Image: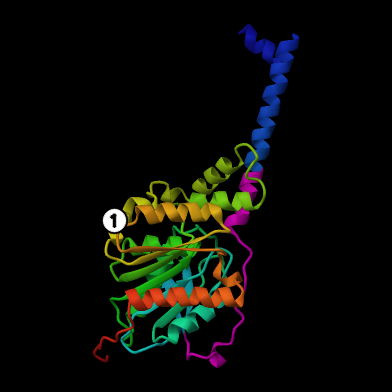
Amino acid sequence: MQIFYELRYPTRWYTKLITALLALVFFAVLATTSIAGFLVYRIVKPQRTSSEINMTSFPGRPEILNFEVSGLGTREGWFFPGLRGAPTILLLHGYESSRGELLTLVSALQDHQYNAFVFDFAAHGANGGVTTLGYREADEVRAAIDLVAARNDVDPTRFGLWGYNLGAYAALREAENDKRVRALVLDSVYDKPEQMVKVGVERNGLGRFPLMVRSAETSFGWLNHDHREDPPLSAKLKNITGVPTLFIQAADDPELAAITRQMFLKAPEPRDQAIIPHGNFVSLGDEDKRAYENRVVSFFLLRLPPVAIARPLH
């Protein structure tokens, strides 16, 4: 008991030093967890960009479609019709992006007779809420596929998915559980959402602070405790055996590029990879953007050709 009394009321120099060090460690841990908690709040509530686009005058004859996502509310999507009975490509935007930034890629696909569909995830565009960095976003993808598959002018059994980081994770998570997905383009995909949290912390310049990344990952885990037992996507990659998948790695995003490469190496056939100098499609210059669009369209033309399959009218 004397040692505890000495620590509580230090009289010797070494106990004073130990007490000071313990206090310093305590306040350092407290400060780290507080900052990490704030960072996670900023990550799951990203700054939203609005898609102020008048669809009535937009080329491609888009239709505005609304659909419900269980537990998340209503979503508004834009459907761009292609060849009747052809497959549909869903374009899934990245973190801190929105559907409006993908319209040139939509047009490139529609020009080749694909149906195309875009919508905004939770906490993006006009939608409120928080992002789960892919856990619940996969539910949004499933609801969007269900909506489009109910139409009589598309092939309800053939869908292609393109996604960038957040959208890529949601696309692969859905594809592992949905046989209607027949082709995938995964740009800067990650294996588990905590990896995207780490990227977010490092992009804020705080990744080198001791325990900052780990504290942020732990805070994010608490927010998403319902998914604490979810395995990483790589554990279920065998489920996409036979689904052609293109993995895109961006040289200027080395952390996600390394994860994407590991995912590619673990993925079953048929699989392809592409290494591009600059990532984030929406921020590319005109020439790089056209090259990117050509790569994506060529992949889908080869792996999921826009052949029409007749369906009875109803």
Q: Which amino acid type corresponds to the residue marked 1 in the rendered image?
A: Lys
Q: Quadrant of the C terminus?
A: bottom left
Q: Position of residue 279 (x, y in %)?
A: 55, 64
Q: Position of residue 193 (x, y in %)?
A: 48, 53
The answer to which image quadrant residue 112 occupies is bottom left
> Residue at (59%, 71%) from the top-left corner?
284
Q: Residues within 10 Å of mark 1 (few under 14, many from 20)?
A: some
Height in image: 35 above or below 106? Answer: above
Q: How is the image coloured?
A: rainbow
Labels in figure, total: 1
Height in image: 115 above or below 177? Answer: below
Height in image: 211 above or below 89? Answer: above
Dot 1 falls on a residue whose secondary structure is helix
> Residue at (53%, 48%) from the top-left corner?
220
Of residue 122 and residue 210, the one placed in the foreground of this image is 210
Could one spot residue 70 in this view of the protein?
no
Q: Is residue 181 magenta?
A: no
Q: Quadrant of the N terminus?
A: top right
The answer to which image quadrant residue 179 occupies is bottom left
Q: Is residue 38 magenta?
A: yes
Of residue 36 and residue 186, the one placed in the foreground of this image is 186
Which residue sits furthest top? 2
> Residue at (62%, 49%) from the top-left corner?
202
Height in image: 8 above or below 74? Answer: above
Q: Position of residue 163 (x, y in %)?
A: 46, 67
Q: Which residues are magenta?
A: 35-63
Could one spot residue 95 in this view of the protein?
yes
| Circle 1 residue | 238
Q: Position of residue 234 (x, y in %)?
A: 37, 52
